[in-house]
Image (cartoon, helix red, strand yellow):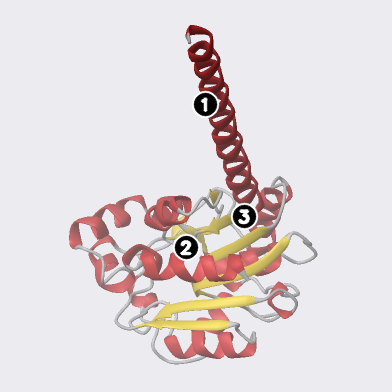
């Protein structure tokens, strides 16, 4: 009887060990699958525009990272379309795997140029952004339709040692002009940390645009006072936008005021 009990006990132990090993194998396979899925997600490269900086994407970044997207918020130099695009192109070249390029405002001109000839850029997302044709400038497009009130909201240009000029938005005009749907306290911080753009950058003609060959998505607010909504609708239609989202009441910084909507569109572009 004792011999039978010992055999029974050993059999139960062996079965338990096999079940445990099977469970570990299943968990390991699941972890490997999840890791592989994460690696295959494209890297989202976010490019801010004039009078903003990388932190304007903070809430969008949180939402994208929650869905396991690798994210880079590039520090756009805001010195000129060609040189800024070369800088962003370097960021893209450093990424192993596919990239979704996202540009806000003047950053749209930058990503469209930076993506030209980059086989790993699978999508462009224009967030309240310029999408110029070759030879067009941001200033050309902003003035193509009525509605922009940026000019009177600018501070006197700051003279630079090289003879150029930097542009800022007046702090007391920043909230209403740039970020009307952002809480006042947050808008004050944004005004204090705004990055200036070289005046010449807004007038610099764009090169051959990537939106002619790379699928593009557009999102903007109908309360934008920097780039007239009519101009943005025109650019989206011209670029044969895969999807265009117009956010009712949103200001020029729709990525800050409505990060959930912006992140959702980026994920759509990344998942296509």
Local crowd at mark 3 within 10 Å, few (<14), some, or many (≥20)?
some
Q: Is residue 200 visible?
A: no
Classify 147 as above or below 215: below
Q: Nearer the viewer, residue 93 or 203?
A: 93
Q: Nearer the viewer, residue 252 or 146?
A: 252
Which residue is farthest top? 2
Classify 25 as above or below 87: above
Local crowd at mark 2 within 10 Å, few (<14), some, or many (≥20)?
many
Q: Which residue is disc 1 drawn over?
A: 16
Q: Which residue is disc 2 drawn over?
A: 50
Classify 204 as above or below 229: above
Q: CA distance from mark 1 to mark 3?
A: 38 Å
Q: Is residue 216 toward the left or the right of residue 181 in the image?
A: right
Q: Residue at x 61, y 35 (%)?
A: 25
Q: Position of residue 68 (x, y in %)?
A: 51, 50
Q: CA distance from mark 1 to mark 2?
A: 64 Å
Question: What SS does tag 3 mark?
Answer: loop
Q: Which mark is residue 41?
A: 3
Which residue is farthest left? 184
Check if mark 2's residue and mark 3's residue have beta carbons within 8 Å.
Answer: no
Question: What SS does tag 1 mark?
Answer: helix
Q: Residue at x 45, y 68 (%)?
A: 264
Q: Residue at x 56, y 27 (%)?
A: 15
Q: Position of residue 16 (x, y in %)?
A: 52, 26
Lower sequence index among marks 2 and 3: 3
Q: Where, by quadrant of the figure, is residue 258 drawn? A: bottom left
Q: Is residue 193 toward the left or the right of residue 199 in the image?
A: left
Lower sequence index among marks 1 and 2: 1
Lower sequence index among marks 1 and 3: 1
Q: Residue at x 59, y 34 (%)?
A: 22
Q: CA distance from mark 2 to mark 3?
A: 29 Å
Q: Is residue 14 toward the left or the right of residue 223 in the image?
A: right
């Amino acid at each position: 009887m004792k011999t039978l009990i010992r055999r029974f006990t050993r059999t139960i132990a062996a079965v338990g060990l096999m079940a445990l090993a099977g469970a570990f194998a299943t968990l390991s396979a699941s972890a490997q699958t999840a890791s592989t899925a994460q690696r295959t997600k494209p890297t989202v490269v976010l490019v801010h525009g004039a009078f903003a900086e990388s932190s304007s994407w903070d809430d969008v970044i949180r939402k994208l990272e929650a869905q396991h997207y690798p994210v880079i918020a590039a520090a756009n130099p805001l010195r000129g379309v060609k040189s800024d695009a070369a800088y962003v192109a370097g960021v893209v070249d450093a990424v192993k795997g596919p990239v979704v390029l996202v540009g806000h405002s003047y950053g749209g001109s930058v990503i469209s140029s930076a993506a030209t000839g980059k086989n790993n850029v699978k999508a462009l997302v224009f967030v309240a952004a310029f999408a110029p044709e070759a030879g067009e400038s941001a200033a050309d497009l902003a003035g193509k339709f009525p509605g922009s009130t940026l000019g009177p909201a600018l501070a006197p240009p700051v003279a630079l040692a090289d003879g150029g000029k930097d542009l800022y938005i007046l702090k007391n005009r920043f909230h209403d002009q740039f970020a009307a749907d952002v809480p006042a306290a947050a808008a004050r911080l944004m005004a204090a940390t705004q990055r200036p753009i070289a005046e010449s950058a807004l007038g610099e003609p764009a090169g051959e645009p990537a939106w002619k060959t790379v699928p593009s998505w557009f999102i903007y607010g109908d309360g934008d006072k920097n780039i007239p909504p009519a101009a943005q609708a025109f650019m989206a239609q011209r670029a044969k936008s895969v999807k265009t989202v117009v956010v009712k009441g949103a200001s020029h910084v729709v990525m800050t005021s409505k990060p959930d909507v912006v992140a959702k569109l980026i994920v759509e572009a990344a998942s296509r």
